[in-house]
Image: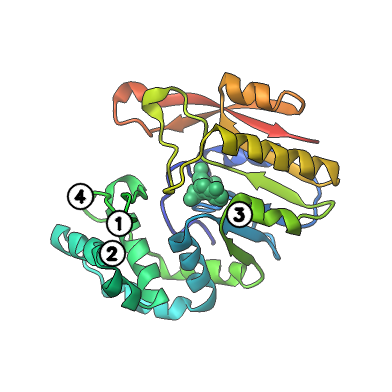
């Protein structure tokens, strides 16, 4: 057993089989520069993987699960699921001095609790970097599964965890490695743009920069597979590579009309 320990918007669990069917048959190192909840990473369970995310709160959680799962579990047991407690814990980042005093374990524990009891597993901060996700009102949410945390910790022992922009992984990619990219998607239309994840956002220029990294990976004899939305922009950007269309049930939109099967693409160089 080993599965994501957080809910993550854009999580890839539904598309896992399509993604696995489109992976190279053999490769050396597994690299995932937009790790998020890590659905594919936990499914593959490859040793010596390299994972990265721009969100330092998220990568701190991975670090703590790797290095101190016991302390994390002890701290997680202290939380109680009530609206008042949720907002009290959420408010800790309103005062930078208080927040800085929290240990890395306390920050990781707060992250998991807010993720599992906040609305829809959303991660959203305002311009000051303060969490502003409303309370989720779930009757009996599972905050954590002790065994799973230990299983993830075992897998993470051999993993390298990096924090920052996706391009930071470039220097570590070697011929024969496999890089899976699951970036913030190009929005389908102006009203459906959940592209943020971070204060920096993810605009067209970043999509171009990512395509350049894919070209680099191709040029050195490594493999890449990239998920993104089925849009003219992406179809055109990756037209020199193989593109496979897959379907996913997405519920990013709060209106019922925004739900249902949405086409996505997988682009690959092999
Ligand atoms: C679509 S999610 C990945 C979901 C993941 N595959 C899963 O199964 O949960 C995109 C991730 O990219 C991260 N991100 C956003 N901008 C980034 C950047 N410039 N470099 C690296 N990661 C970034 C976000 O923090 C988010 O976790």
Q: Which callout, 1 or 3, points to the residue nearer the camera?
A: 1
Q: Name the residue that disc number 4 marks.
A: 137
User: Which comes sooner in the sequence, label 4 or label 1?
Assistant: 1
Q: Quadrant of the C terminus?
A: top right
Q: CA distance from mark 4 to mark 2?
A: 21 Å
Above-or-below relation of 194 to 178: above
Mark 3 vs ligand 1: CB under 8 Å?
A: yes
Q: Is disc 1 placed on a helix, strand or loop?
A: loop
User: Which comes sooner in the sequence, label 4 or label 2?
Assistant: 2
Above-or-below relation of 242 to 97: above
Q: CA distance from mark 4 to mark 3?
A: 30 Å
Q: Name the residue that disc number 2 marks.
A: 93
Q: CA distance from mark 4 to mark 1?
A: 20 Å
Q: CA distance from mark 1 to mark 2?
A: 6 Å
Q: Name the residue that disc number 1 marks.
A: 130
Q: Is disc 3 placed on a helix, strand or loop?
A: helix
């Amino acid at each position: 057993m080993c599965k994501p320990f957080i809910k993550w918007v854009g999580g890839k669990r539904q598309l896992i089989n399509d993604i696995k069917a489109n992976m190279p048959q053999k490769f050396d190192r597994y690299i995932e520069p937009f790790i998020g909840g890590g659905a594919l990473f936990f499914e593959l369970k490859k040793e010596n993987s390299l994972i990265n995310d721009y969100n330092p709160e998220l990568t701190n959680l991975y670090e703590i699960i790797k290095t101190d799962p016991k302390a994390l579990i002890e701290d997680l047991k202290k939380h109680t699921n009530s609206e008042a407690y949720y907002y009290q814990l959420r408010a800790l980042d309103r005062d930078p001095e208080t927040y800085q005093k929290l240990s890395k374990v306390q920050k990781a524990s707060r992250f998991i609790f807010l993720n599992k009891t906040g609305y829809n597993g959303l991660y959203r901060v305002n311009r000051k970097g303060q969490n502003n996700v409303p309370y989720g009102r779930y009757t009996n949410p599972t905050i954590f599964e002790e065994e799973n945390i230990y299983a993830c910790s075992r897998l993470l022992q051999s993993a390298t965890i990096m924090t920052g922009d996706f391009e930071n992984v470039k220097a570590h990619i070697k011929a024969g490695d496999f890089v899976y990219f699951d970036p913030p998607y190009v929005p389908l239309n102006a009203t459906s743009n959940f592209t943020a994840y971070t204060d920096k956002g993810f605009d067209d220029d970043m999509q171009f920069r990512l395509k350049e990294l894919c070209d680099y990976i191709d040029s050195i004899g490594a493999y890449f597979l990239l998920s993104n939305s089925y849009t003219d922009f992406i179809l055109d950007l990756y037209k020199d590579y193989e593109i496979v269309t897959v379907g996913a049930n997405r519920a990013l939109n709060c209106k019922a009309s925004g739900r249902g099967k949405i086409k996505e693409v997988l682009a690959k160089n092999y």
